[in-house]
Amino acid sequence: VQLQASGGGLVQAGGSLNVSCAAVGRVLAINTMGWYRQAPGKQRQLVATITHDGRTNYGDSVKGRFTISRHNAKNTAYLLMNDLKPEDTAVYYCNANLRRIEASFWTNEWGQGTQVTVSS
């Protein structure tokens, strides 16, 4: 099982970006999916999470600007980022709490990260 992130890139302040994260492979079920980010020299922090039934949670710094959604049948989560600021610059990591087909337990998986850079 892999978490494959796409999107991200370079955008000017005030602009928007979409990133997506797909869980591919032998996935039986996914509980929570989400995004975390890490800027140089800083700790990884919560951006947003979404449960299987659509309950969302956002980090304080992105509330009102970012929107997370998911398509359960596609095992994919999406993050729409609006009104981006230079302080949003970071590597964004996808995360999923999932159960593999051959497993009897849940695991916490991470994607490889995608760079988001916001210029002032």
Image: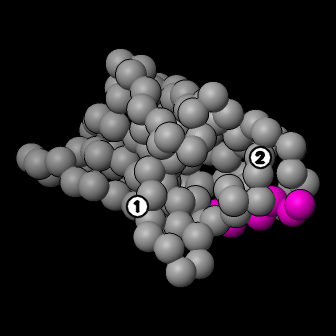
Which structural element holds mark 1?
Answer: strand
Q: Quadrant of the N terminus?
A: bottom left
* Residue 2 seen in the current view: no
Which circle marks residue 82 in the picture? none
Q: How many labels does the image show?
A: 2
Farthest residue in the bottom direction?
Answer: 41
In the image, residue 49 sits, relative to residue 13, either above or below, namely above
User: Label 1: which residue?
Assistant: 110
Q: Give the left or right position of residue 80, taking residue 92 as reference.
A: right
* Residue 30 seen in the current view: yes
Q: Name the residue at 34% across, 37% down.
A: 32
User: Label 2: which residue?
Assistant: 84
Q: In which quarter of the image is the C terminus?
A: bottom right
Magenta stretch holds residue 117: yes
In the image, residue 84 sits, relative to residue 120, either above or below, namely above
Please state the horizontal and vertical placement of residue 11, each as a whole percent of the image. Answer: 87, 55
- In terms of image quadrants, where is residue 117? bottom right
Amino acid on which the number 2 mark rests in the picture: Leu
Farthest residue in the left direction?
Answer: 104
> Magenta region's main secondary structure?
strand
Q: Name the residue at 53% across, 81% down.
A: 41
Magenta stretch holds residue 108: no
Q: Give the left or right position of residue 38, taking residue 11 as reference.
A: left
Q: Give the left or right position of residue 16, taking residue 63 as reference.
A: right
- In terms of image quadrants, where is residue 28? top left
Observer-side mark, 2 or 1, equals 2
Q: Name the residue at 86% across, 43% down.
A: 14
Which structural element holds mark 2?
Answer: loop
- In terms of image quadrants, where is residue 107? bottom left
* Nearer to me, 75 or 91: 91
Please state the horizontal and vertical placement of residue 105, each as a whole percent of the image. Answer: 11, 48
Question: Where does the magenta region start and end?
Answer: 113-120
